[in-house]
C-alpha cells in the first residue's frame, strides 16, 4: 500500500500505547453495530487485565479475570477470534464477571505481537446475540493492526501500511468501516470529530431540543412587534446552544441542525398573534441548503425575519444575495445580527443591505456608562437612517441602558428587561413585556 502518510499524517510518530489502545476501544464501540462496550485485555501471570475500556465497560480498567475461566483467556490460548451469543448459557465464559460488568454477548479478538498472543480486543453488548459473522470478520481484519499498537517503541507507519496492504483473510467484513476505524485511531482529532458527529446526529434524530421565544419590543410604545426564536437543548449535562451549533458546524452537520430547529420553531408561527413577526437565525450554509425552500414553502414569509449572524463567514456575497432574493421578494425581512461584535457584521451590512441591523449585546450592555459604546451606536443609527434600515438593540437589561438607547433614536429592542426567552404559551404577547417597565413610555 503506497501513500499511507498522505491520508494519515503522523503515522511515523512513536505513540504511547495506552493512549492508542484507548482510542482503539473508543472507536471499536462505534465500529460494530450493536456494541455498547469495548476493552483491551492483556494476558499477565495467568490473568486477563483490562488496560483500556470504553462505553459500558469504561469503569472496568484494572479488572483482572482468571485466564483459564474466561472467553478472552481462551481466545489467547487458541489464538482465534471467539464469539459468545449469551453469557448466561455459554460455559466458556466467567458468568459472574459478565454479570458484574453488564456483558451478555461479546467477541474476543486475540492480539498478536512477536508471534505470541498477548491479549484481546473485546467488543461487548448488554443484549444477547448482538453480533454476527460479519462483525467477526471485520474485527479479524483489524486484529493485526490493533496488535501493533501495543509496542510502544514501534513506528506505526510501516506496520500499518503492511497490515492494510495484506491480502484479505476471507469471510467478508466492512472495508469502509475498517478504513474509518484506522484513520480515527491514528488521528485523535478525527476520533473526536466522529464522536461529536454521532452526538449531533442523535440530537437531530431524537429532536432533543425545543424552541423558546424572546419578545422584540417597539421602544417608543412598549408594544411587542415580534419574537426571536431561540433553541434550548435537552441532553445532559446541560450545554449552551452556542456550543451545540458550533459542534454541529465543526462536524459538518451545522445546516442540518439549523434546519431541524427551524422546522420546530416554524411549527409555532401560526400560534403567534396576527401581525407579529418571527425572527430566526440562519447561517449562509443553511440558507444555501436545498431543503430550506420546501421547509418555508407553506408559510407567510411576510411574518419571517431571517437573521444572518456576524460570526458566520460569507465566502460569496453575490451568491448569498441571490439565495436570499426569493425570500425577500416574498416579504421576508433580512437582519444582520450581532453588529458591533466584530468587523464582519459591517461587511454583512454593506454587502447585504439588510432591513434590520441588530446591535450586539456587548455594545448595548453598559452603554449608559461608556461614551465609546454610545458613539458607535450613534454611528450605526445614522447609517441605518441613511439606508432605510431599522435598528434593534439586543441585551437590554437596565432602565438606564433603555433610556440611552431610546435617546439615540433606536426604535426596537429586546433583552431581559423587556422579556426573557420562554415558551410561546408563557409569553403575554398582548402586552409583550407583560408588566413591562415600558408601560410609561410614550405617555
Image (spheres, helix red, strand yellow):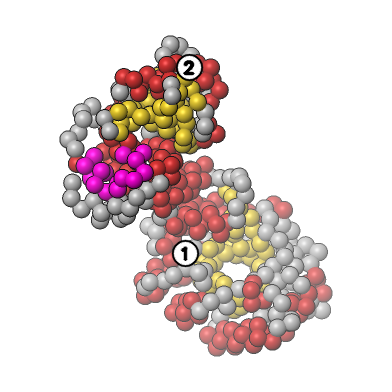
156 falls in the magenta region: yes
Along the line of sight, which residue is nearer the eye, 17 or 384?
Answer: 17
Side (left or right) of 399 relative to 317: right
Query: Which quarter shows the C terminus?
Result: bottom right
Q: Residue at x 38, y 25 (%)?
A: 108
Along the line of sight, which residue is nearer the eye, 380 or 86?
Answer: 86
Extent of the magenta region: 148-164
Give residue 425's position: percent from left, percent from top. 69, 52
Q: CA distance from mark 1 to mark 2?
A: 54 Å
The answer to whether residue 293 is visible is no
Q: Residue at x 60, y 87 (%)?
A: 379
Q: Residues within 10 Å of mark 1 (few under 14, many from 20)?
A: many
- Tell me which numbered mark, 1 or 2, is placed earlier along the sequence: 2
The answer to whether residue 19 is visible is yes
Give residue 47's position: percent from left, percent from top. 45, 23
Determine which residue is flagged by label 2. Answer: 94
Residue sitting farthest toward the front:
45
Q: Residues within 10 Å of mark 2 (few under 14, many from 20)?
A: some
Q: Residue at x 28, y 41 (%)?
A: 176
Along the line of sight, which residue is nearer the eye, 326 or 421?
Answer: 421
Q: Does residue 58 sit above or below 270 in this rendering?
A: above
Along the line of sight, which residue is nearer the eye, 165 or 289?
Answer: 165
Determine which residue is flagged by label 1. Answer: 283
Give residue 312's position: percent from left, percent from top. 47, 68
Label 2: state its secondary structure: loop
Q: Are marks 1 and 2 in contact (CB under 8 Å)?
A: no
Label 1: state its secondary structure: loop
Q: Residue at x 47, y 49 (%)?
A: 196
Badge count: 2
2 falls in the magenta region: no
Amino acid at each position: 500500500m503506497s501513500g499511507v502518510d498522505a491520508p494519515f499524517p503522523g503515522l511515523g510518530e512513536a505513540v504511547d500505547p495506552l493512549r492508542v489502545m484507548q482510542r482503539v476501544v473508543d472507536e471499536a464501540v462505534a465500529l460494530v453495530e450493536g456494541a455498547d462496550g469495548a476493552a483491551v485485555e492483556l494476558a499477565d501471570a495467568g490473568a486477563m487485565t483490562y488496560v483500556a475500556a470504553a462505553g459500558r465497560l469504561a469503569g472496568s480498567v484494572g479488572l483482572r479475570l482468571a485466564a483459564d475461566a474466561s472467553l478472552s483467556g481462551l481466545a489467547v490460548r487458541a489464538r482465534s477470534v471467539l464469539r459468545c451469543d449469551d453469557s448466561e448459557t455459554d460455559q466458556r465464559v466467567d458468568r459472574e464477571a459478565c454479570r458484574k460488568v453488564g456483558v451478555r454477548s461479546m467477541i474476543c479478538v486475540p492480539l498478536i505481537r512477536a508471534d505470541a498472543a498477548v491479549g484481546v480486543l473485546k467488543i461487548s453488548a448488554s443484549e444477547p446475540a448482538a453480533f454476527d459473522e460479519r462483525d467477526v470478520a471485520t474485527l479479524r481484519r483489524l486484529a493485526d493492526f490493533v496488535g501493533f499498537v501495543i509496542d510502544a517503541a514501534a513506528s506505526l507507519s510501516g506496520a500499518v501500511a503492511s497490515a492494510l496492504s495484506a491480502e484479505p483473510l476471507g469471510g467478508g467484513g466492512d472495508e469502509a468501516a475498517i478504513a474509518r476505524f484506522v484513520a480515527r485511531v491514528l488521528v485523535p482529532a478525527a476520533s473526536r470529530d466522529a464522536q461529536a458527529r454521532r452526538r449531533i446526529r442523535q440530537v437531530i434524530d431524537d429532536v432533543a431540543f425545543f424552541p423558546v421565544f424572546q419578545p422584540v419590543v417597539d421602544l417608543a410604545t412598549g408594544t411587542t412587534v415580534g419574537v426571536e426564536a431561540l433553541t434550548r437543548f435537552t441532553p445532559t449535562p446541560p450545554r449552551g446552544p452556542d456550543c451545540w451549533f458550533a459542534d454541529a458546524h465543526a462536524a459538518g452537520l451545522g445546516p442540518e441542525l439549523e434546519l431541524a430547529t427551524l422546522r420546530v420553531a416554524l411549527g409555532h408561527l401560526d400560534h403567534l398573534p396576527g401581525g407579529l413577526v418571527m425572527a430566526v437565525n440562519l447561517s449562509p450554509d443553511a440558507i444555501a441548503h436545498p431543503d430550506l425552500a420546501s421547509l418555508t414553502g407553506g408559510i407567510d414569509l411576510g411574518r419571517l425575519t431571517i437573521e444572518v449572524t456576524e460570526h458566520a463567514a460569507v465566502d460569496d456575497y453575490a451568491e448569498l444575495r441571490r439565495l436570499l432574493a426569493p425570500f425577500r421578494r416574498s416579504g421576508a425581512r433580512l437582519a444582520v445580527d450581532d453588529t458591533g461584535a466584530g468587523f464582519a457584521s459591517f461587511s454583512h451590512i454593506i454587502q447585504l443591505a439588510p432591513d434590520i441591523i441588530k446591535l450586539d449585546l456587548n455594545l448595548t450592555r453598559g452603554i449608559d456608562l461608556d461614551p465609546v459604546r454610545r458613539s458607535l451606536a450613534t454611528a450605526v443609527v445614522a447609517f441605518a437612517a441613511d439606508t432605510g434600515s431599522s435598528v434593534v438593540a439586543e441585551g437590554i437589561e437596565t432602565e438606564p441602558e433603555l433610556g440611552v438607547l431610546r435617546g439615540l433614536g433606536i426604535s426596537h429592542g429586546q433583552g431581559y428587561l423587556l422579556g426573557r426567552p420562554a415558551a410561546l404559551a408563557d409569553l403575554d404577547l398582548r402586552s409583550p413585556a407583560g408588566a413591562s417597565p415600558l408601560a410609561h413610555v410614550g405617555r
